[in-house]
Image (cartoon, helix red, strand yellow):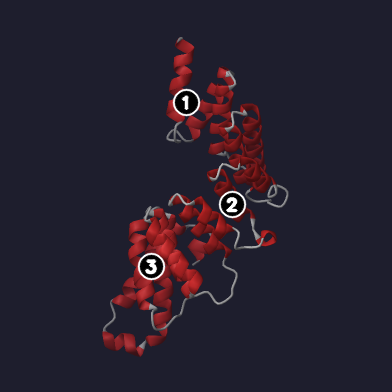
Amino acid sequence: MLYKKIEGKSDRSIPLFQKAVDNWEGLSPEEKKARHQEHKNYVKALYQLASALLDNGLARKALAYIEKCIEADRESNHLSMVYKYFALGKVHFELNEFREAKDALVFALEVNDNKPVDFVYELLARVWLALNNPQKALETILTVPEKKRRPYYRWTEADVYCAMGDFNRARVVLSSTLDRDRRSKHRALIKLAKIEYLLSNFKKAEEYAKQASEFFHERWGGILNDALFWQALCAYRTGDRNRSKKLALELKAHNPRYPKLQTLLTKLRQSESS
């Protein structure tokens, strides 16, 4: 737990949780009976192992362990049904198995005992978007009262309005998060940049991307790849090829495999030779 939750080193936690799982599964039936109180730790290790595997891009392996966790905890219920089925839905979502994800999340909501589960509604809304059903996504999002919607929830709410073509409403939703979000404001700013770019407001889009970069650097002290890309792309679209190239090459130095970066660099080279 130290690696995963305190240090955030989920990759290092994988062998620790795997060892805990293997230790229990290596016991004889008699040993398991004698040490039945440790079964709870086994269930928790399965859950945490699935979570760590998912964090590290190993969703297919994560699926096997969360399913094993649910089965092992079927009678004991050491862990919340909501959290187990939310985890199952999250894994299916990462595997692009959206109908299975929907079923798991709907079940998580059905077994919920009047506790706050905005995180389940938020993921379910994303599932509905993936299933090309923005109306159901909107109905899901609106289940949580507006005053209780946290910034991450409103990001998805904005995505829903964008999918429905209501970009003005999406702008309002995203802008409402900027003053209250002191940790992840850059996420909303990048989404705003994408909206403005889509509407051909390239100067405004670049300004949002610049704000995202400045916030991220001030708050976290690093480089925000998304901000560099959208600034570079917007500069290209406004005709400032030199600034676009400078930003694109800076991004290449940090993340040469950034999606569509090579396409932008190719266009910049072509513009120089024409």
Q: Nearer the viewer, mark 2 or mark 3?
A: 2
Quadrant assignment, res 101: bottom left
Contact (Cβ within 8 Å) of mark 2 with mark 1 = no
Provide the residue designation for mark 2: 157
Question: Does residue 53 appear anywhere in the picture?
Answer: no
Residue 23 position (above or below residue 123): below
| Residue at position x 59%, y 19% in the image | 240
In terms of sequence position, does the residue under pointer 3 or pointer 1 come before the other?
A: 3
Quadrant assignment, res 47: bottom left
Q: Position of residue 38 (x, y in %)?
A: 40, 82
Crowding at mark 1 (Cα within 10 Å: few <14, some 14-19, many 20+): some
Q: Position of residue 99 (x, y in %)?
A: 39, 59
Mark-to-mark CA distance, 2 and 3: 28 Å
Mark-to-mark CA distance, 2 and 1: 30 Å
Mark 2 secondary-structure assignment? helix
Quadrant assignment, res 202: top right
Residue furthest to the top in view is: 274
Residue 39 position (above or below residue 121): below
In terms of sequence position, does the residue under pointer 2 or pointer 3 come before the other?
A: 3
Provide the residue designation for mark 3: 66
Disc number for residue 42: none
Crowding at mark 2 (Cα within 10 Å: few <14, some 14-19, many 20+): many
Provide the residue designation for mark 1: 264
| Residue at position x 46%, y 65% in the image | 105
Amino acid carrying label 2: it is Glu
Contact (Cβ within 8 Å) of mark 2 with mark 3 = no
In this image, 123 relative to 64: left or right? right
